Image (spheres, helix red, strand yellow):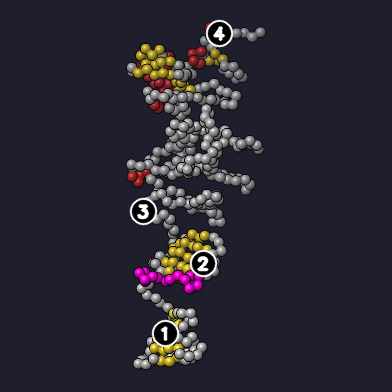
Amino acid sequence: MTKTRDLADLGGGFIQAGTGAVQRTVESKLQDMVSVKDFGAVGNGVADDTAAINNAKAHATSTGKPLLMPEGLYNISGITYNATGPYLYLDDNFTTPVNLGLSSTNNSILLTGETPNTTPLEPLDTRVLLSSTVVANGANHADAARLNLINKSTDGQGNTAVYTRATNYSNALAGFALYGETRHNGGTNIGCNVECTSYTTSGSLIGVNIQNTSGGSDDHPETGGPSLLSPPTQNYGIQIQGRTGVGDLGLWYYGLYMRVNSIKSTGTAIKIDSDCVTGIDLAGGTFSTAALRLADQQNITFEGTNVIRLGYNSTAPGGAALEFYNGANVNIRLYNSGICDFRGNVRPTVDNTNDLGATTLRWAKLYSTELHIGGGEPIITSGVGTPEGQITAPVGSMFTRTDGGAGTTLYIKESGTGNTGWVAK
């Protein structure tokens, strides 16, 4: 026969159910938690509960015990606060309320809360559902929250150590599924640090995965319709944003920085494998120095049969800035000094078309060993000594002798098809 006991039957003793439980006094058991009503708080919205709540907080702080504020209206220094709780304060400062709801079949602990539409009387107390604070001292690591997932599942949609979800309605302002804030005062501050450790060569290792599931049947607001099948144009996978009004303090020095030994020597720093219209768009901003900067001896290579290579080489004459080459010979090289170096023929796409220069845009100087003109291609050239027996050219060609004298400076090719027929004028 099971005996039923009430508080009077305990006779000042309490024993918790379970193997190994020891007897305690009822007073000791009830003092495991501090309630504001233990110190005289009424919670009817009329009585002044200021002193009672302050005394309860002070005692809970000194003893390190949780503080309980049952549901009620508490008049604190003339202001009435509505506790829809019960609120259980778990931190030493007792500034963050935690509303413990009933656990469901899918949750070990279910925390629910809602902020009012009006301005809260204590914003810090009403906008935070769950808060954890740890003060790190010494050389050991300190984590305000640590969640570990041991994944043994071979099916399903994937298992996560942390899952967050933010549902934005049509008129709502920004809602963050995950928001991290760091405050820098020396040392190294990292807004988000993701560490991946792989112990196998199979599968994939991804540091950060950003996936857009717009339009999915399970991704729309709880009381709304499905998401737009065509998202807005201002949709960013990663947005790097600074803060205005604080000068350089609110700006990043590098938008994307890959440290030494972060990418394999045989790997690719950035790979774009998408059917997008533009791979990299450098428009939309004012670049004070350069949109793209390459260090000495670095190149940008466009793969293909005929290759274009951009870069700067301080050891080349003038520093080659742009090269067109076929893998063996450089065809065209543009230098940063303004020199254009052609390693082959420069010709129009159709015979006897296009001009080199114009009547109002003339070339200042033309340096050439031979100048071929006309349909029969007579040449104009120069050199030392007589061209007779030396220079092969068609009839009508001209030769200027740089060491000639009176009657031997200009030669005309008047006959023959070889290197003879030159007549001095």
Alpha-carbon distance for marks 1 and 2?
32 Å
Does the CB distance between marks 3 and 2 fall below 8 Å? no
Q: Residue 220, relative to residue 260: is it above or below?
A: above
Q: Residue at x 37, y 12 (%)?
A: 46
Residue tagged by mark 3? 288
Residue tagged by mark 4? 6
Q: Residue at x 54, y 13 (%)?
A: 14
Sequence-wise first label, 1 or 2: 2
Alpha-carbon distance for marks 1 and 4?
126 Å
Sequence-wise first label, 1 or 4: 4
Does the CB distance between marks 1 and 4 fall below 8 Å? no
- Tell me residue 134's x, y (percent): 45, 32
Tell me where residue 188 sits by quadrant.
Answer: top left
Residue tagged by mark 2? 325
Q: Residues within 10 Å of mark 2 (few under 14, many from 20)?
A: some
Alpha-carbon distance for marks 2 and 4?
96 Å
Tell me where residue 293 sits by quadrant.
Answer: bottom left
Q: Residues within 10 Å of mark 4 (few under 14, many from 20)?
A: few
Residue tagged by mark 1? 382
Q: Which mark is residue 412?
A: none
Q: Which residues are magenta?
A: 347-362
